[in-house]
Image (cartoon, helix red, strand yellow):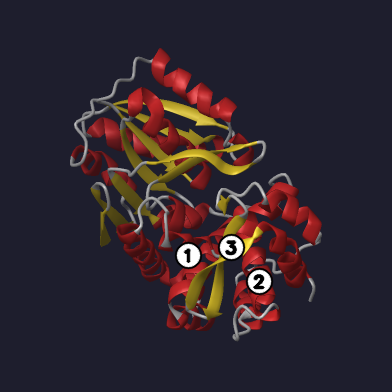
Amino acid sequence: MKTVEVQASTQYPIYIGTGLLPKLGEMAAAVTKAKTVVLVTDDIVNELYASEAEKALQGAGFSTLKFVFPNGEASKNIKVYGALLEFLAENHVTRTDCIAALGGGVVGDLAGFAAATYQRGVDFIQIPTTLLACVDSSVGGKTAIDLQAGKNLAGAFYQPKLVLCDYSTLSTLSDEIFSDGMAEVIKYGAIFDKSFLDFLEGKDAKAHLETVIEKCVTFKRDVVHLDETDKGMRGLLNFGHTLGHAIEGCSRFAISHGSAVAIGMVLVSRAAFKSGMTKADCTDTLIRILQKYGLPTETEYTAKDLYAHALSDKKRDGGQISLCIPKALGECVLYKISTDALLPFIEQGVTV
């Protein structure tokens, strides 16, 4: 087992290993004084791991409640968020209780936002069960729901008390969902560490999960330490995300987050080189590594389609939007571009 310590507005451990889910109760008891833990999960993960999580919590003396909602990004909305808040209130959950998110990024984002806002904040535990959630969304305290106008437009920064990453749960993922997580893994290498990208290209990430997850979590931990509330360098973690979120929106979330981010990284890399923002053309190398892990690298949506959705991106600041641009593989910088210049920039990216 590996342990990564986060020291943000609160301090908490991230445990990475196999066979950790049966230890959930004792690990939770070490970080919360709650009497009741509300397990929030989706209908797929509920069938796979909820009973094991409940058993572990009850074995450590916790009372448990469970809220289950339909799997998928389409559930990360005001209606399901409101239903969760009503469930907490109807069951007399108090500020001294705890919410535990068991699932992927949608579960963690939704449950975390409820934990941040119900009675102005209750203890929160992340138990990621997808690679994407393990390496990215469960760490750093970003919680959110989607609005009709765009993704993650309502949310809060709210750190968990504990992240328990039992990567044996990844064995039940489909190849497509595993690939989704690899987009975020590859993103970290593209932003911070060319040697990590080389490792991913030369090895099979699935055979080195503990190393891969620890590496990604450490990258994110270090950024969160310096910029917890996303006012500066944390924006680097959004490489590929502005156009990725636009692709998700255009598809009405039929295209998954990881697939959209993979395409977004390619489009931004190509556009940055062709427009002269960077002298390094990282596009072909990125395409090669992304395709190795079964990820798409092009889109059928037009630049105008993507532009319309990108204007609602939360990284927009008045007449500007902040993009993460690869100066070289393993070295990215933040670049502010006017919204007027964004459309021709996207056109450069979609044109091969």
Cα gap from disc 1 to disc 2, whole angstroms: 15 Å
Q: Earlier in the sequence, mark 1 or mark 2?
A: 1
Instruction: Between label 2 and label 3, give the one nearer the viewer.
Output: 2
Front residue of 37 and 267: 267
Q: Earlier in the sequence, mark 3 or mark 1?
A: 3
Amino acid type, mark 1: Leu
Front residue of 337 and 257: 337
Front residue of 346 and 83: 346
Q: Kindly tell me whether residue 272 is visible in this rendering.
A: yes
In this figure, which residue is indicated by the disc labeled 3?
Answer: 179
Residue at image point 64% right, 61% down? 338
- Where is residue 157 drawn, in percent x and y? 39, 43
Cα gap from disc 3 to disc 1, whole angstroms: 21 Å
User: Above or below — where is 266 with respect to 224?
Assistant: below
Quarter the N terminus occupies? bottom left
- Image check: 261 left or right of 30? right
Amino acid type, mark 3: Ser
Amino acid type, mark 2: Val
Residue at image point 69% right, 77% down? 275
Residue sticking out furthest to the bottom: 279
Tag on residue 271?
Answer: none
Residue at image point 58% right, 56% down? 177
- Image check: 259 left or right of 129? right
Q: Kindly tell me whether residue 301 is visible in this rendering.
A: no
Cα gap from disc 2 to disc 3, whole angstroms: 16 Å
- Where is residue 181 drawn, in percent x and y? 53, 60
Place residue 99 in its image quadrant.
top left
Label 1: which secondary element = helix
